[in-house]
Image (tube, rainbow, N blue to C red):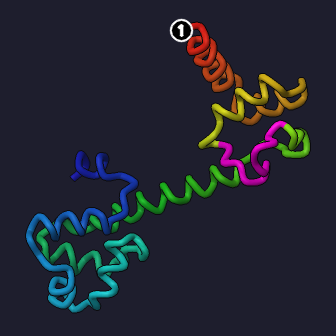
Amino acid sequence: MKNELSILKGLHPGIILEHELKKRNLSKGRFAISINEFPQTLSAVIMGKRSMNTKLALSIEHALGIEEGFFMTLQVFYDIKEEKQRQEQVAQPDLSILRPILFWDTKIEKINWQNHKKAVIRRVFERGNLQEKQEITRFYGKETIEQVLNNQRLTIQA
């Protein structure tokens, strides 16, 4: 189970459940009724609109002959991934130091600083002043800055 879990970490348990039902050629609605669950509930889990709960996970695992705790473990890993993404979106440099004009093509408050770090670093180091460069270096770390800028130099030279 450990090898399988490491591959599946971060996936919603509904994705795995849907795959398992398809593999066994089982109808979602009929399967839901067979485990005394509302088909709408099972569909919501499969579509990722609802979390897996312990009672449902145990029912599914028992009915499918899957190791107990498998779906709840997947749910925990999924929840961890989601929380990390929320925390990354909250983390941002000190916006009072960065001039909004640097990001003229977008609202500075809406930037996802982790997903767009390469573009942010390049822009600040091309057009920013010393204070802005220092803030971006503090936020991302010297190693990340050097890595992005060195990769950019390699790309420009190629």
Q: Point out residue 84 in the picture as x, y percentages from the top left corner.
A: 56, 53
Q: Quadrant of residue 115?
A: top right
Span highlighted in magenta in the image = 102-113
Q: Residue at x 90, y 29 (%)?
A: 131
Instruction: Say whether residue 153 is left or right of residue 68.
Output: right
Q: Point out residue 128 in the picture as x, y percentages from the top left corner.
A: 85, 28
Q: Residues within 10 Å of mark 1 (few under 14, many from 20)?
A: few
Position of 45 relative to 71 (above/below): below
| Residue 105 lies in the magenta stretch | yes
The residue at the far front in this view is: 105
Asked which secondary structure carries label 1, the reply is loop
The residue at the far top in this view is: 157
Q: Quadrant of residue 99?
A: top right
Q: Residue at x 31, y 52 (%)?
A: 8
Instruction: Say whether residue 155 is left or right of residue 4.
Output: right
Who is closer to the viewer here, 55 or 88? 88
Q: Point out residue 13 in the picture as x, y percentages from the top left corner.
A: 32, 65
Q: Point out residue 105 in the picture as x, y percentages from the top left corner.
A: 76, 44
Q: Quadrant of residue 90?
A: bottom right
Q: Can you identify the residue that label 1 sits on?
A: 158
Q: Amino acid at mark 1?
A: Ala
Q: Residue at x 31, y 80 (%)?
A: 43
The residue at the far left in this view is: 24
